[in-house]
Image: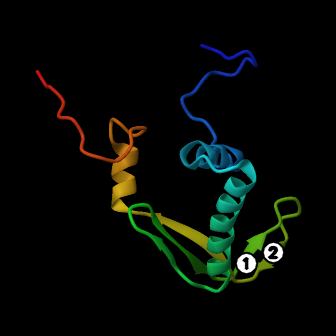
Amino acid sequence: MASAAGKPETSERTVTKADLIEEVIRVTELPRKESETVVETVFESIIEALQKNDKIEIRGFGSFRSRERRGRVGRNPKTGAKVEVPPKRIPFFKPSKELKDFVNSQKAAAPAGPSEPTAQG
């Protein structure tokens, strides 16, 4: 089946910062401005910690840290000339076992909690 734009429909959707803000509004019933502040503060805190080379660990979700990528010799795709690529730090996310289990479960969209046994027959 194709969408109105002519692209095939997929179950994948992109969740944006605005979607996260809307979810904070829905769950907490805070005003929009305060909900935006909550979401922004979380993102800014993660960025600041990574800039300081700190590790962020969110139990049941995962951890963020920065990794050192070593320098190397690359090639310019247009000219083929060798280019020195300097070492740099990159952000890295490692999901927790719980998050991996939620993503791979049949009820990935369901909230955490006791799951109902399924009948097999």
Give the quarter of the image for residue 59.
Answer: bottom left
Give the quarter of the image for residue 119.
Answer: top left
Residue 87's disc number: none
Q: In this view, does 19 lie to the left or right of 106?
A: right
Q: Which residue lies furthest to the right in this view?
A: 79
Q: Is residue 50 above or below residue 106?
A: below
Q: Residue at x 38, y 38 (%)?
A: 110
Q: What residue type is labelled 2?
A: Lys
Q: Residue 38, image x and y in percent?
A: 65, 61
Residues under numbered marks 2 and 1 in contact, where contact means CB atoms less than 8 Å apart: yes
Q: Which residue is drawn at 68% across and 46% down?
A: 16
Q: In this view, does 106 lie above or below 74?
A: above
Residue wearing tag 2: 82
Q: In this view, does 2 lie to the left or right of 92?
A: right
State the quadrant of the N terminus.
top right
Residue wearing tag 1: 73
